[in-house]
Image: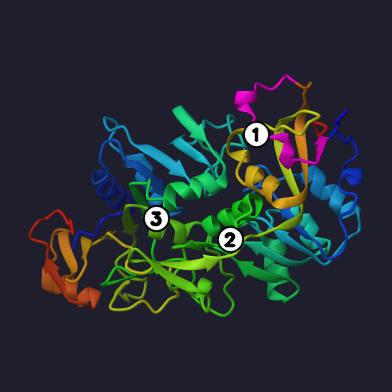
Amino acid sequence: MIDKIEPNARRALAGLTDGMTVMIGGFGGAGQPNHLINALIDCDVGELTVINNNAGNGDAGLAALLLAGRVRKIVCSFPRQVDSHVFDKLYREKRIELELVPQGNLAERIRAAGAGIGAFFSPTGFGTELTRGRETRRIDGRDYVLELPLHADFALISALDGDRWGNLTYRKTARNFGPVMAMAAKTTVAQVKNVVELGALDPETVITPGIFVQKVVPVTEDA
Amino acid sequence: MIARRTRDQLAQRVARDIPEGAYVNLGIGLPTLVANHLPAEREIILHTENGLLGMGPAPAAGHEDFDLINAGKQPVTALPGAAYFHHADSFAMMRGGHLDICVLGGFQVSVTGDLANWHTGAPDAIPAVGGAMDLAIGAKSVFVMMEHTTKDGTSKIVESCSYPLTGIGCVTRVYTDLAVLAVLPGRGLGVIDMVDGLTLSELESISGVALFMDASGTGSG
């Protein structure tokens, strides 16, 4: 019997070791898998490369992971925010490396990794300092920059409902990076608000099919 | 006496040019104000990059849902007919040319429609780009909404951007507190309208670049 449900978040992260690349879902706080991030902090691994849209908000979740000194490098599109004080301090003290990627290129590079695409040409960022030195091509009169896929060892995402096969639904704009990150990592761990019986999800409404998910961790109300 | 547009008057002026049926993305900051001035009789669908079409206004106090936010991470609502989608789809809507209009803030716009709006390049500044570059090259029309000059009077309309670029030749129109300008490829910046009390030569002098009246008045080109 296939059973991807793992009530223990730390056990769900078994195999996540120093130096790995970890995708973390969420756009600001929406869709950020704080329960899994807290378990990651407890795991005592470091030198991580983290891929997220932002670089932490406030003091919880991703910001707490940064504050704990576990992240060597962050790949993101929008680190600077009113409440990104944890990242700001680390960056100014040169204690974290930043790779800034335009948001759509970030999403599509993740999607490309999950879809087995070797590289693609994107018009976004052509002629700007964020794509300096990269291979370009003019196609039908328009200029493009070569973009490579972004793979990860682990993806930690947050979803609404999940079943024991790993099928997932999401809630409103908390969906954001979840579906593409789930596809792009060797191991995807999803925290879910509700674990539902197999067959309870209408197949028409499943957003992430279970083939992309290895572990489903139920979250208690206070997490 | 030059009657500069207030922020709300500027937002109202931009809103006037957004037609019935348009799919529109409003950037963070000043462009967000445009939503308050869209004519009620027009059906206009707002896109937010984090995964929603059919974005509605902010919820009443006490009804915030932090799974339902806009690009500025503020709580919003979803109108009847709204749709949620993931990030790769959201940016396909931009890059794929499906979005009719985006309204962006700006640091500088050049006479050829180059835009700089993401980074001052200052050594101590923490860079952040978000979806600006995708919107700039993706939307069918790119409206830039900004003060005509900086606080010290330096023109934000320039021959060539000194700040790091967001996109090359991507701007369709510029809406400022003094004028509306159309970027006309091969011709430069055409003035669609100016505020009362301002002449073309005065506007040229403030802007520091050559301008001409856009006789068509439509800014198409």
The quadrant of the rendering that contains the C terminus of chain A is top right
Disc 1 marks which residue? A170
B60 falls in the magenta region:
no
Disc nearer the start of the sequence (2/1): 2
Task: Give the amino acid type for the residue marked by disc 2 in the picture.
Answer: Ser
Chain hosting mark 2: A
Task: Give the amino acid type for the residue marked by disc 1 in the picture.
Answer: Tyr
As displayed, is residue B17 above or below residue B107? above
- The numbered disc on residue B138 is 3
Q: What element carries label 3?
A: helix
Chain hosting mark 1: A
Residue drawn at the location 39% of the way across and 60% of the way down: B137
Q: What element carries label 1?
A: loop
Q: What element carries label 2?
A: loop
Q: Where is residue B40 in the image (x, y as percent from the top left)?
A: 29, 31
Whether residue A138 is visible to the viewer of this picture, yes or no, is yes
Q: Position of residue B70 (x, y in %)?
A: 52, 44
Q: Where is residue B138 in the image (x, y as percent from the top left)?
A: 39, 55
A211 falls in the magenta region:
yes
Disc 2 marks which residue? A77
Residues in magenta, as a range: A199-218
